[in-house]
């Protein structure tokens, strides 16, 4: 039997991609797999693809109320900030800058999205933090020199950054 399989060129293909950038809400887990966003109930079950347009979706973060997801998407050659309902839908683009914008987190009150960008740093490899309303608008640069990742404290106006 084995000789027959080998002589016919039978091969097994393993499709083992990485499940990356997970985030957890009260009810769901979102993650990136094969450059798309997927969501699965926190209690377990089958994961559902939230997005399938040609492009890349990474760094998903649930809003504090769990109703939407902010993420970094690249559909046209540039990474920008998008939001998407937790149960799927059409991504809404929030930033339109020529440089890379990367989602970092939500503010605890859900009124702003924290993101990192080199848009005003003078060099793209040096990011600064900005905040942006979930409906879009003009981003506001936060008063710190440089940062890549961080989190806003729910206890008050403190931002932890790296």
Image: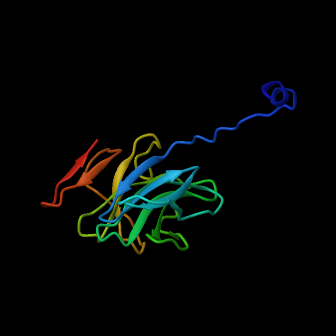
User: Is 15 located above or below residue 112 in the figure?
Assistant: above
Q: Nearer the viewer, residue 160 or 128?
A: 160
Query: Which residue occupies 62% across, 56% down?
Result: 55
Find the residue positioned furthest to the left.
155
On the rendered image, what quadrant is the C terminus found in? top left
Splitting the image into 4 quarters, where does residue 147 fall? top left
x then y, percent, for residue 59: 44, 52
On the rendered image, what quadrant is the N terminus found in? top right
Q: Nearer the viewer, residue 128 or 157?
A: 157
Residue 98 is left or right of residue 104, and the answer is right
User: Is 141 located above or below residue 84 in the figure?
Assistant: above
Residue 28 is left or right of residue 26, and the answer is right
User: Can residue 117 be spotted in the picture?
Assistant: no
Total numbered labels placed on residues in the image:
0
x then y, percent, for residue 118: 43, 48
x then y, percent, for residue 39: 46, 61
Splitting the image into 4 quarters, where does residue 42 fall? bottom left
Find the residue positioned furthest to the top.
3
Query: Which residue occupies 12% across, 60% down?
Result: 155
x then y, percent, for residue 19: 49, 46
User: Is 64 located above or below residue 20 in the figure?
Assistant: below
Find the residue positioned furthest to the right.
8
Give the color scheme: rainbow, by chain, secondary structure or one colour: rainbow
User: Can residue 141 be spotted in the picture?
Assistant: yes
């Amino acid at each position: 039997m084995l000789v027959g399989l080998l002589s016919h060129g039978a091969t097994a293909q393993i499709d083992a991609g990485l499940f990356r950038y997970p985030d957890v809400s009260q009810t769901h887990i979102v993650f990136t797999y094969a450059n798309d966003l997927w969501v699965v109930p926190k209690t377990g079950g089958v994961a559902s693809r939230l997005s399938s347009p040609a492009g890349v979706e990474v760094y998903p973060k649930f809003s504090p109320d769990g109703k939407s997801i902010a993420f970094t998407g690249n559909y046209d050659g540039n990474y920008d900030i998008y939001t998407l309902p937790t149960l799927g839908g059409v991504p809404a683009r929030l930033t339109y800058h020529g440089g890379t914008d990367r989602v970092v987190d939500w503010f605890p009150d859900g009124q702003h999205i924290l993101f990192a960008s080199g848009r005003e740093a003078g060099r793209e490899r040096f990011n600064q933090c900005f905040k942006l309303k979930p409906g879009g608008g003009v981003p506001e640069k936060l008063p710190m020199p440089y940062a890549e990742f961080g989190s806003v404290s729910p206890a008050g106006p403190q931002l932890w950054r790296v």
